[in-house]
Image (tube, grey):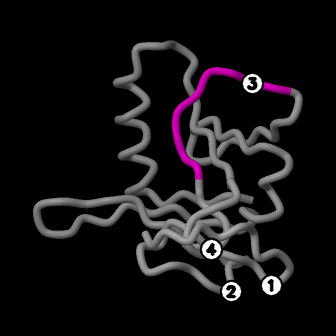
Amino acid sequence: MINITDSAAERLKDMLEQQETPNMFLRLGVTPGGCTGFSYAMGFDDNETDQDIYMNVQDMKIVVEKESIRYLDGLEIDFEESGMSGGFTIHNPNAIATCGCGSSFRTATDAGKPNEEPC
């Protein structure tokens, strides 16, 4: 299950409304890389495949590739305001280590493929 806080859902819904293509949804995933082993992927998409898992969270369609769900189960996405800016934050209970910038992680059972470049 993926959790999205009210503040993140509000921001994501605003962003979805601004998309020019109809029927867009939020796609979440994981790719090898980043300074810790895996990087998060989050973006809008309208292309569905048979390798996807679909869920409705905060009245939004969320799509996760089947291979990524084991890394994202229990994930929480939040949006935090910080002074004159703000951004999405991710809390992943599966991560045993994360990088300083918070965009990559590794799990107890899979180290991924870390890049040599820092965040």
State the residue lying farthest toward the left. 84
Label 3 with label 2: CB-CB less than 8 Å: no
Whether residue 62 is situated above or below residue 83 in the rendered picture:
above
Label 2 with label 1: CB-CB less than 8 Å: yes
Q: Look at the image and tell me in which quarter the C terminus lies.
A: bottom left
Q: Which amino acid does label 4 sit on?
A: Phe
Residue 33 spot, x, y in % from top left: 63, 61
Give the residue at x 11% y 61%.
Answer: 84
On the picture, is 29 further left or further right than 109?
left
Whether residue 47 is situated above or below residue 89 in the rendered picture:
above
Label whose residue precedes the other's in the sequence (3 or 2): 3
Q: Which residue range is magenta in the image?
A: 41-49
Q: Mark 3 points at which residue?
A: 48
Give the residue at x 32% y 66%.
Answer: 80
Q: Name the residue under label 1.
A: 108
Q: Name the residue under label 2.
A: 96
Q: Residue 20 lies in what quarter of the image?
A: top left
How many other residues sit within 10 Å of disc 4, few (<14), some (14-19) or many (≥20)? many
**Distance of label 4 from label 2 (alpha carbons):** 7 Å
> Residue 18 lies in magenta, yes or no?
no
Q: What residue type is labelled 2?
A: Ile
Q: Residue 105 carries which label?
A: 4
State the residue lying farthest toward the front. 116
